[in-house]
Image (cartoon, rainbow, N blue to C red):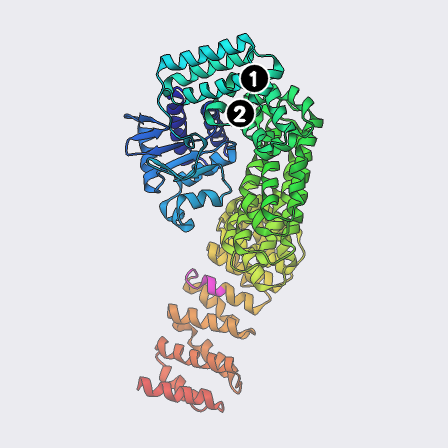
Amino acid sequence: MEQSFVTDFLKEIAVGFKTAKSYPPGHPVMEKVVGKTMLQLSKIYTDFSEFSMYFLERTVIFQDQRIDIGKNPAMASLLDTLRKNEINSLTFESGVTNDDVKNLYEVIISPKLKVREYGDAATMLTAKGTQRIKINAVKFGIQTGAPAQATAEPGVAKEHAEVVEAIKNLKELVEQGISMIDTKDKFHEVMDDIENSPKESQQLYRESVARIIETLPAEHRIELLQDVELKPIVMKMFSSFSEDTLVNMICSRAESDKGDDVKKIISTLGESKFARVMPKLKEKIPNIYEYLAQVGLVLSEKLATTISKDDLRIAMKPYYSMLDSESPTDREKGLRSLISLAQRFVEKKDYEQAGEFITRISTAIAQESVGVIVLKIIDDLSSLYQACKKNNRKNFCSMLIDPFTKLLGRGGLSSAFKKKTIKFLSETGNIEALPTLFSFLWESGIYPDVREAIIQFGKDAVNEALLTLKEAEDHDLRRKLVDILKSIGPVAIDLLLDNLEATDEWYLKRHIIAILAGVGDKRVIDRLVPFIEDEDERVRAELVRTFTKFEYEEGLMKLLNDPSSDVKAESLKGLKTKIDREKILELLSLFKQKGDGLHLELLKIVNEQKVNEATDTIVSFLTSLALRKDAKATELKEYAVSVLVKLKSENTKEILENLTLSKDKKLSHLAETALKRIT
């Protein structure tokens, strides 16, 4: 085989490694790279059904070839990373799929700490469901994975002239029509000689032998090849056979009930070669699709372009059966296969066929009783969803989201499953996912994930959040919803204001006003002003707090005329550093109105701004509190007396002496204590 094939394959892996660090699995750029890797891999498969590569510092060992990577920076970076993750060799068996390559790239780019979570890179790759690519299955000079090309015992090396002479003798036997027994013996002898000849000459020898075999009558060709051992040297020759020879050889093995041989041959041929023989083959082997399903070729892109819809339905039966299997492993494999095929048909814009697969996928996920299976395939599902989204298949997108509502309704799901589902639903960007995402707010321990996911929807999440808030009775749930709406930010403002103006529920108004305060955009003030006249005191109280945050003095001044003393008190609290002495004197009349909170805020303002003119008003206020013995009145008396002392009016002592004569024992005691402090 040409060394350039191996070099090109290594370069493609290096490119894939670099790309995987920048793009997530399923991204169109990454999918393109995976496709190119598979293309280079198929070229090697034409000569080797299985092969291994061993990595040294700046050298790759492939079979008996040493390939120097030279100064290629991408390949050097790849080898460095492989060594860091203790990946010393890679073995590629027949039947490697796109998913296997994706998983390999994911393992290669994984940080060492993440790899250690699985134990080692080989275990991590296996855990992702990849069986046909093996890490560290071979050691330098020792192969533990037993790929086919390493199983033959080395024979005596043959010189070029010896091999040519052996091939010539085989040709003469065929031309003379010698018995098939002798021809078979000579054929086996020639193949052994080729196997022990220099590698660089083997392809030429194999092609010569193939041409000789093609000159035999069809029945003799079948007889010659029927029982031949499928050693690598023999299987490499298959690419040189005509389509008729290949079809007859596969049919002969199938009729002899040698299913494993059929699978080996099919896998070795590769998808392109096999697609060309498929029309003839399916006429002769009714159950050919069972073999296709077992080796994964039914999912190949080239084969999919040649297969009819009726044939495809037959081919899919094994996968549909997997969905109903009692084995979780089979169900997972069936789902992965259908998802892969559905994505291919979506990308080919064959939406009718893709729809049939997606319907099956949706039903299977909704019925799946083992959450970990869905957890394992959710990345594949995300890739399929993005393909549907890109092709504007809204009905397919809905079908892929819908099963999760049913799954979550069962309960008992792990935190890891919930978090993975939240991430998947968030990445869809589909507003149909919002009700399911909001349902996670009742769950404990995952709020940060839910919050981040919902916020990604921006203003599209506002109406669903408000609808949930309207019905929410649980305080913790309401707190979460308010937090989410605040975090959505300015893009939510118009919708929040529209809902504020449209609703009659006081509690929803109060929450929306608080949310707008949290967003912090003062442009909402003009549309909030009308709520100064709202009939519910609790709404107006929240409005005061919002105006305070916005430092909107005009609104706070208007709310000082509110019929509620509590609202007035909140307004005063917001204004205490904003109003001047003259305005404070005007407000002293509020001491004559009811409202302990209001009176306390007035006292604080008088105290902080040292308004001596308020002394007489405070004395009158204290007199009005006489004989009240409740806790709030006691607090007001204590604070009012302390304010009188701090104001230091000329007649403070006289005032306190008069208060000691009060019939209110508490007030009298407070005055006496104050007198002692100032005298």
Q: Which residues are magenta?
A: 572-579
Question: How many circles with numbers are drawn on the protein?
Answer: 2
Decide: is 225 above or below 646.
above
Q: Name which residue type carries label 2.
A: Val
Percent x, y for residue 464?
A: 62, 49
Q: Tell us which disc is closer to us: 1 or 2.
A: 1
Task: Residue 43: tell me if it is visible.
Answer: no
Q: Residues within 10 Å of mark 1 (few under 14, many from 20)?
A: some
Q: Residues within 10 Å of mark 2 (few under 14, many from 20)?
A: few
Q: Name which residue type carries label 1.
A: Met
Which element is circle 2 on? loop
Q: Nearer the viewer, residue 214 or 649?
A: 214
> Sequence-wise, which precedes: disc 1 or disc 2?
1
Quarter of the image with the C terminus in it: bottom left
Decide: is 598 above or below 516.
below
Q: Is 83 colored magenta in this rendering?
A: no
Percent x, y for residue 478?
A: 58, 59
Residue under numbered circle 1:
180
Quarter of the image with the N terminus in it: top left
- Residue most extreme to the right: 310
Q: Give the distance between the C-alpha atoms of the residues marked 1 and 2, in whole angstroms.
A: 13 Å
Which element is circle 1 on? helix
Residue under numbered circle 2:
228
